[in-house]
Image: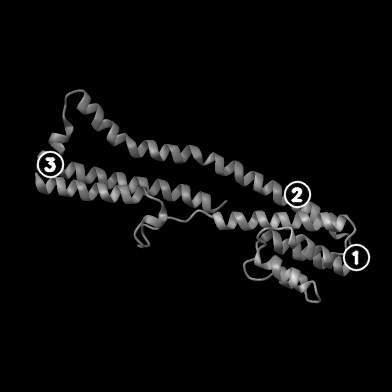
């Protein structure tokens, strides 16, 4: 009896650890869940705000170099490539600064727009405006996809809770399943196996959801 309860407690602890967020899991590669891309989302939003501000400044008639500095000053926390571009506006290569390590796709595209505009004399404001509109549409699609992930996440939670619901229903019907699961060797084996399989299923479901979130 004591051994069965100890085994069940260990298996339950494994299940709890699996259901916790990725940072609370042991640092074993097999159990590490992909972290949600919160930092990437913040950087994308800041880059989009800067591109929109830069387009607005150039449309207002400001020269491109001073517009780079003015647009960066409007951000509470500018990405590093934007800070580098504002510093380069004093006489450096703005496009190269925008391609600094850590620059996202939007800033790389803004660097290409800058090079085309400076090389051909084409209007920078129009290209940046089109770029910002496309990036904002991409963010809208990401939000819709992230909202759509709520359903599979809820499904994973429901499936994880079904065994406990089954035990409660059995107890309500007077079958007392816990007495058999905790009071006999076959029951202990069934309980431990069920909890291990439940943990693996929950881990698999959450890895699928987190990988989809990381791809947004």
Residue at the location (54% across, 39% down)? 148
| Residue 81, image x, y percentages | 68, 67
101 to 10, vertically: above or below? below
The residue at which mark 1 appears reads as 121
| Residue 157, image x, y percentages | 39, 39
The residue at which mark 3 appears reads as 186
55 or 149, which lies in front? 55
98 to 15, vertically: above or below? below
| Residue 167, image x, y percentages | 24, 32
**Residue 38 falls left or right of residue 200:** right
How far apart are labels 1 and 3 at the CA level?
80 Å
202 or 51, which lies in front? 51
**Label 2 crowd bin: few (<14), some (14–19), many (20+), radius 10 Å:** some
The residue at which mark 2 appears reads as 133
Question: In what element is the residue under mark 3?
Answer: helix
Question: In what element is the residue under mark 1?
Answer: loop
**Label 1 crowd bin: few (<14), some (14–19), many (20+), radius 10 Å:** few
Q: Quadrant of residue 147?
A: top right
């Amino acid at each position: 009896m004591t051994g069965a309860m100890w085994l069940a407690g260990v298996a339950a602890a494994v299940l709890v650890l699996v259901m916790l967020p990725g940072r609370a899991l042991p640092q074993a590669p097999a159990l590490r869940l992909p972290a949600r891309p919160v930092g990437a989302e913040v950087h994308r939003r800041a880059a989009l705000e800067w591109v929109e501000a830069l387009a607005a400044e150039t449309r207002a008639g400001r020269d491109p170099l001073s517009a780079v500095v003015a647009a960066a000053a409007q951000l509470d926390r500018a990405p590093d490539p934007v800070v580098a571009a504002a510093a380069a506006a004093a006489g450096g290569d703005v496009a190269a600064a925008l391609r600094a390590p850590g620059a996202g796709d939007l800033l790389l595209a803004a660097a290409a727009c800058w090079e085309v505009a400076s090389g051909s004399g084409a209007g920078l404001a129009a290209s940046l405006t089109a770029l910002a509109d496309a990036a904002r549409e991409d963010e809208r699609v990401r939000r819709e996809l992230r909202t759509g992930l709520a359903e599979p996440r809820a499904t994973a939670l429901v499936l994880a809770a079904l065994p406990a619901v089954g035990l409660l229903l059995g107890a309500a019907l007077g079958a007392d399943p816990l007495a058999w699961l905790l009071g006999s060797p076959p029951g202990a084996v069934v309980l431990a196996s069920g909890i291990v399989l439940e943990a693996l299923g929950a881990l698999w479901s959450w890895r699928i959801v987190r990988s989809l979130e990381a791809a947004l």
